[in-house]
Amino acid sequence: MKSITKQKTMEEVEQSLKGLDRIFIIGCGTCTTMTKTGGIDQVAEMKGKLQDLGKRITGTTVIPTACDDMTETAMKENEQFIRNADVILSMACALGVHRMSLNISKPVIPAVDTLFIGVEETPGFFREACAQCGQCLLGETAGVCPITACHKGLVNGPCGGTNNGKCEVDKEKDCAWTLIYNRLKEQGRLELMHRYQPPRNHHISLKPRSVRIQ
Ligand code: SF4
Ligand code: SF4
């Protein structure tokens, strides 16, 4: 599972950095390295682009995993360079931005957009696997998530637009409900296709969600 990100355009980054001229850049050695949006090479590239725009880069680092405790340590190690900066430009996912912000009062600005949590289906191709809806249906849908695999997020069967097993929204993609049907059939559990899923209880996913592990 990886946090999937895409780089913001340089126009967006420039806009976010308006009036902030001294910048410390932080990348991540895990997800954004793998997606080539915020690893060593992309941090170096960003540094060059910002310098071309007349910005001063006080330093850069790529934290092995920017969403955990390593962030605090790395920021301490780079304290003097960060002190000289007006802002931290994060090339980690939103979890990294959050983590960095916990350790500093200066602004932390994301240079990437966090899209979804995905699994690699084929080399370099990631698909959203779970939207963390809080009411998992995988046990009744033979392991195919109707929230993420169906373009309409339908939980009570197909929309009617299925054509030869393909989705009407994206003809290249298998219809989630055809996959569910086929897998349930294979498992001898086709009766589950008739099970009615009541309206979702949005109270259990009120934001921010939290849990205490005893
Ligand atoms: S139903 Fe889909 S989105 Fe919801 S928890 Fe299960 S896998 Fe995640
Ligand atoms: S064709 Fe299938 S996957 Fe596409 S929106 Fe309809 S039910 Fe969902």
Image: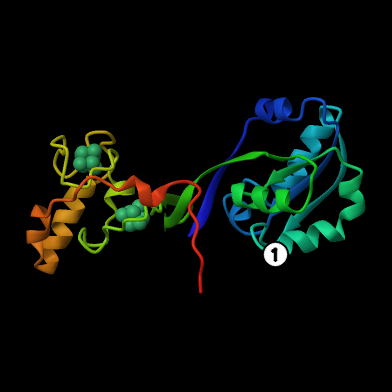
Seen in the image, is 9 located left or right of residue 103?
A: left
Instruction: From the top left corner, tell me how far across and down residue 103 is, in percent.
Output: 76, 53
Q: Residues within 10 Å of mark 1 (few under 14, many from 20)?
A: few
Seen in the image, is 68 located left or right of residue 48?
A: left
Whether label 1 lies within 8 Å of ligand 1 gets the answer: no
Seen in the image, is 57 located left or right of residue 9?
A: right
Instruction: From the top left corner, tell me how far across and down residue 157 is, in percent.
Output: 15, 46
- Ligand 2: give its quadrant: top left
Image point 14% across, 57% down: which residue?
A: 182
Image point 20% across, 53% down: which residue?
A: 179
Front residue of this view, candidates 81 and 124 = 81
Image point 40% across, 49% down: which residue?
A: 205
Q: Is residue 113 above or below residue 10?
A: below
Image point 63% across, 54% down: which residue?
A: 33
> Three-letter amino acid code at disc 1?
Asp
Instruction: From the top left corner, tell me how far across and down residue 146 is, in percent.
Output: 27, 49
Residue picked out by circle 1: 69
Which SS class for mark 1?
loop
Inspect this view and state whether residue 122 appears. no
Instruction: From the top left corner, tell me how far across and down residue 88 is, in percent.
Output: 78, 43
Q: Is residue 151 above or below residue 189?
A: above
In the rendered view, how is the structure colored?
rainbow
Inspect this view and state whether residue 91 appears. yes
